[in-house]
Amino acid sequence: MPNVGNDLHPYLRHQMMPTVWCPGCGHGNIARAIATSLERLELDLGHVVVLGGIGCSGRTPFYFNTNAMHTTHGRVLAFATGLKLANPSLTVIVAMGDGDALAIGAGHFIHAARRNIDLTVVLYNNSIYGMTGGQQAPTTPRSFRSTTSPFGGIEPAFDAVDLALAAGATYVARTTTFDFAEMPEYISGGIRHPGFAMIEILSQCPTYFGRLNQLGDAPEMIEYQRNHTVMAGDESQIGRDDLLGNLPVGIFRQEIRPEYTHQYAELSQAQGGDYRA
Amino acid sequence: MHKAVQTPDRLGIRLTGRGGQGIILSGVIIAQAAMYDGRFVVHTQSYGPEARLGASKSEVMISRWEIAFPEVVLADILLCLSLDAYLKYGSQVASNSLSVIDDLIGITAPAPGQVILPLRRTARDLGNELSANIVGLGALVAITELVEVHHVQQAIKERVKPEFSEVNLKAFTRGLELGEQWHASA
Amino acid sequence: MRLVQGNEAVVLGALAAGCNFYAGYPITPATEIMEQMARMLPGRGGVFIQMEDELAALGAVIGATWGGMRAMTATSGPGFSLMQEHIGYAAMTQTPCVVVDSQRIGPSTGQPTMPAQGDVMQARWGSHGDRPAIVVTASSVKDVYDMTQQSFTWAFTYRLPVVLLLDAVLSHMRENIELPAVSPPSLPTSADSADSEDPYKPFGNHPFVPFSANTRTIVSGLAHDETGNTRGAVGPASEQILRDSLSHLDEDYQKITRHRNYRLEDAQWLIISYGITARAARAAVDILRESGVRAGLLELMTLWPFPELIVKSIARHVQGILLPELNLGQLVLPLRAAVGGLCPVAGLGRADGELFTPEAIAQAMISHSRKIERRVSHHA
């Protein structure tokens, strides 16, 4: 993990370092942004649980000095839902990959969003399956190459923000690893938000996505992100066709709706139970 | 009256009809009443995929001793509320069995042990054909004395939603009367 | 005395065991368990949630267990197949939980309302890789209550998912039973956690300690050692944890094995049965005895670990064994392996959605015995 300042050391589980992430991978920057958010919010690490699914992003929980669960591919939100309901006082942070959240776990993703349960999903989107060696992801843009779309993909990419909005997530944001300041800002916003928060972060995978699509090394890929994203609200510049056009970034929704564990507490108490959210 | 009913050491009752006719509920009520009588009981049920109109079957074993095999093979007592149920189960009865069959099924020449009664019509007159199951229950109880009347009434109160308690108790009473009339005429 | 349905007995037994979390997905013939949990848990301060599928249901159960609750789910064949991924995860992470599978005819959608015993092997071997397993069953509504309660105890004692196998008939069957008055057991709390000075070992042969402010546990389905470390050459450490768990079950074999003998003392012909089929087998023993055949029944209430020793000790004293089951030959496989050459074993299977009648089992026992007697006289 690059540039870990002394102030972040207490948040990290040093015996698990170095990370599995390749040189130039954006995931370390995202993990750093999560640590920065924990530090800014002055959270007690004993009351934070970091969970992950399977894939490169799924390794995130290993690097935090908290209770942690590295779960199954796509289904981390089911575990997180059970955990949060069992102990609503926990701050639950969920790292998911694009394959995790939008392919194998899309069903879990939309239902967690629909329930508006107070979880913070950080969606590491590197547009490819990195851990298994560069296969096409549901976020791989049309015509881009992967080892399973060697002639260029013919499928349109999923837009995680659109999906989260449609499913009822109450805090929805997107940024990139280029936006070094926005990452912790959006993530801390999501953690503070009392409901289901989804922060998608476009991350670079120079090892596979970059190499297979001649996008260069990490600096060029980060540059590419900058040039292909625009702030949400500047509709004139927004192209809707994923990374090929101008992908909007920013905070898309931030609104208060009844949160699941609180609603459950109301229901329990109305039935004479003592469940507290 | 046949032997099995007079000395009910072990009795197999099969209630049949279509889904939605309350077949399972009537089985539960008999089982609960027999439990209050101090018997061992097992109630089993089976139904098709449709919640309504599929063939429905509910069985109660009543015994003085613990019951091993829980299902009824040949019924000692049969209640039949629909034609399809009659065609399927009408003949799967023990010798000396007693069958109470709704008259709308249209059996013109009842076999020995078959009692044809206006169960659905009586229920309709009471305002709800869906209580035919309870009318049938009343008739069965009056004809066979297989469980105590007041235990059935207690079970109805416990197993039926309070708002339907009265109508079902009335249906049960009408069923008892049908059974007693049959006794008087037989 | 109460008239209780099999599925209701699961709920009552679970609550008596202190179950305070249920996550599930509707499926025939297990759904009543979920419906009653939905009614009972909120008012008791417990948690009920309907998830989006069975994978999510068991995932939520595992998450809740690490969150400090006593959790369970219930399903039937198709849902049980989906749950295998997380049964493996619960095994790998030594997460105590209870899974009830009300068996129906399969494979695939099969006959949703009809009884089966076809998940006996899946319950033991369904997830990829090796794992310790406790699989129990029941043949009466009272058994369902007792075995559900017992499943929670074993789940926490041995730190694994315990599977309770029911079937469509038992789930929907009502019997009058006497329910014991129970006070729910105390739950494991973070106060039980190892003090932070020790090298903290959340896995291996150590008690289950849920997440707390004092712990920094990493739970992972990756191979790991006792500390939860997944890095480096953890293969041998991971295998050792698995071997220790399996040995723990071996050592406690007597404590875990539950069975019931019926007219076994002088039996020459043995019927071994389990679950709902044992009810017909018991009646079959009476039929056989009445016609002069000295039959007896060994009813198995725990299927895995397979009760090899008890089976062997009885097999020495009988001339033949019949195992009827509602599948086309599953538990008969470990039975044959356990009995070896001690006496001839015959299986009797059906998978059409109907129960065996006592008469059918008695008839099969007579055929089996005649075959054996012919063979014996031929050799003599």
Image (cartoon, grey):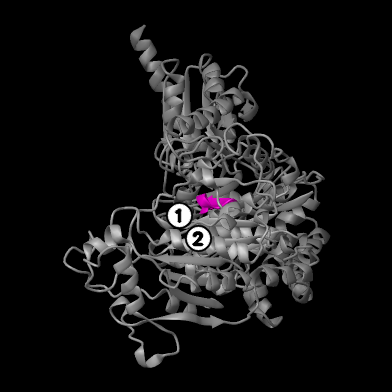
* In this rendering, position of residue A164 left or right of residue C49: left
Read off the magenta span: A61-69
Q: Gap in Å between the C-alphas at discs 2 and 1?
A: 7 Å
| Dot 2 crowding, Cα within 10 Å, few <14, some 14–19, many 20+ | many
Q: Which of these two is toward me, C105 or C69? A: C69
> Residue B105, can we see it?
no
Q: Quadrant of the C terminus of chain C?
A: top left
Residue drawn at point x = 62 percent, y = 30 percent: C256
**First in sequence: mark 2 or mark 1?**
1
Q: Are marks 2 and 1 in contact (CB under 8 Å)?
A: yes
* Residue to which mark 1 is pinned: A1
> Residue A56, can we see it?
yes
The correct choice, above or below, for B72 with respect to B102 in the image is above
Residue drawn at point x = 33 percent, y = 57 percent: A130
Dot 1 falls on which chain?
A
Q: Hey, what amino acid is under mark 1? A: Met
Q: Do pointers 2 and 1 mark residues of a single chain?
A: yes
Q: At which x and y percent is residue C168? A: 54, 52
| Dot 1 crowding, Cα within 10 Å, few <14, some 14–19, many 20+ | some
Residue drawn at point x = 61 percent, y = 62 percent: A39
* Residue to which mark 2 is pinned: A32
Q: Which of these two is toward me, B162 or B143? A: B162
* Quadrant position of residue C263: top right
